[in-house]
Image (cartoon, coloured by chain):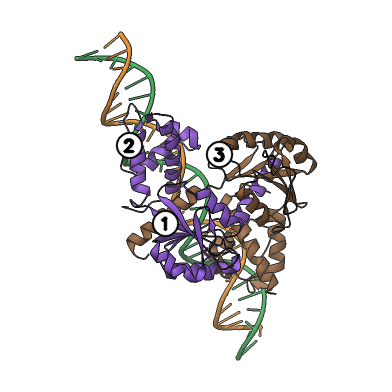
Chain colours: A purple, B brown, C green, D orange
DNA sequence: ATTCAGTTGTGACGCTATTCACAGGATAAG
DNA sequence: CTTATCCTGTGAATAGCGTCACAACTGAAT
């Protein structure tokens, strides 16, 4: 974790990492930067630039060794012991996330859910126990949860985030359509579905207008 | 829809637009760029720069008129008649999106779902009829659907996208962890949940290491 | 041994988005 | 009417990211 690294680079590394899994499964041993570029839609220079961040060295004739590259990206991207994640807000979206992430990435385990609705508290969804928000301090400490995905209604987002931060969470993936204020020691990323849909609507319309290109 | 506009600008305009709704509800009549900046976390210069794209003029003493600004952003961002949206892939995430967008933005109505599973086909979820993928051509034409949200398993993503494009869709919001190849007349945006979570994991860890700032 | 084709790693460059900074303008107060 | 204040709109400067292009290298073929 040496110097300042661009968010975009981390995003692309995560993408390469997933692609490498499929290559590994297909028993591919080596891969060129231009092949990774082809599959991701970036340029080969971009791929090589990104891989400079991780501790690896491509062979100038065979490209990158798939196994070695996976190890290098894993070392760079993931905590050795993994990180535990909770979903806060067990509505439709929260449930979908519990299902989606169940066993998807080995180093990121979703281990708990939180809600305030007695109807879902104490239920087990996809192997995850749902706790009442009142228990967030205890459960976050006990299960060493460092990350939460926040899927509560927008007016509940800030208080819920505050509670999680007080409990010791250091990263929040926020799905509520509200901007969170957090101390500088906490990292927040906003996944704003409404914004994404409006962006697609705008640019799709623009493409329709331009007819092609 | 004049000249080339940055994707980020459109995203921020969508954000300002939503914020303005709450101001309007609170009967606020005028707003300064620095107030919008405060609420969104951008700089006031950024806000003013973004608003240059839309047809509006702030008053140098009172700031922007809230109603006037809403009108200007709406004119710029939305098709006068609105756009119809479909959800393709009615799993947990698809259902969550149907619920989430139900009546959320007046100019973007989710009007249909598609799936291949006979168990969900013909059911009505949150006011949306679910059709079989075989009917995509007919339904897209009849309901004038121009956008889809794609929430199918990753190996079904490309064929599903191709079918939608053939039916006339011009914008795709793809939630499947797969990069889509589409003709240049179609706009695609990838919402890669795994990537977002891994980014949060990385930067949260980095903040933990740095202890603050 | 030599040549050759095709790759990596990276300094230099260029482009685009953001921020700075200030001229010009509106309003309220005196 | 004049002054003081605090805003907007925007040209210019800056920063950040991605691309170019090429030296250095590898291994296969001859």
Please name whichever residue, A47 or B176, is drawn nearer the observer in this view of the structure.
B176
User: Looking at the rendering, in which quadrant would you find the C terminus of chain B?
Assistant: bottom left
Which chain does the residue under circle 2 lie in? A
- Marks 3 and 1, how far apart in space? 25 Å
Q: Is residue B64 in view from this perspective?
A: yes
Residue A36 in the image: x percent, y percent? 44, 34
Left/right placement of residue B192 relative to residue B145 reads: left
Q: Which residue is mark 3?
A: B154
| Tag of residue A84 | 1
Which residue is rendered at x = 63% and y = 65% of the image? B19
Both labels 3 and 1 in a single chain: no
| Label 3 with label 2: CB-CB less than 8 Å | no
Q: Is residue A52 in view from this perspective?
A: no
Query: Secondary structure under badge 2?
Result: helix
Residue B130 in the image: x percent, y percent? 72, 45
| Label 1 with label 2: CB-CB less than 8 Å | no
């Amino acid at each position: 974790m040496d110097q300042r690294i661009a968010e975009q680079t981390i995003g692309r590394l995560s993408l390469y990492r997933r692609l490498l899994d499929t290559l590994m499964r297909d028993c591919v041993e080596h891969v060129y930067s231009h092949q990774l570029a082809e599959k991701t839609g970036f340029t080969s220079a971009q791929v090589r630039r990104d891989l400079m961040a991780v501790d690896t060295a491509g062979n100038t004739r065979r490209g990158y060794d798939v196994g070695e590259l996976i190890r290098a990206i894993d070392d760079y991207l993931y905590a050795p012991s993994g990180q535990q994640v909770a979903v806060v807000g067990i509505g439709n979206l929260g449930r979908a996330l519990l299902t989606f992430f169940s066993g998807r990435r080995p180093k990121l385990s979703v281990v708990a859910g939180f809600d305030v609705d007695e109807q879902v508290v104490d239920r087990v969804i996809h192997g995850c126990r749902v706790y009442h928000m009142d228990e967030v301090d205890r459960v976050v400490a006990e299960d060493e949860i460092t990350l939460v995905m926040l899927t509560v209604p927008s007016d509940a987002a800030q208080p819920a985030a505050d509670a999680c931060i007080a409990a010791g969470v250091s990263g929040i993936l926020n799905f509520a359509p509200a901007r969170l204020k957090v101390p500088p020691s906490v990292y927040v990323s906003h996944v704003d579905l409404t914004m994404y849909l409006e962006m697609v609507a705008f640019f799709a319309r623009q493409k329709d207008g331009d007819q092609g290109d």
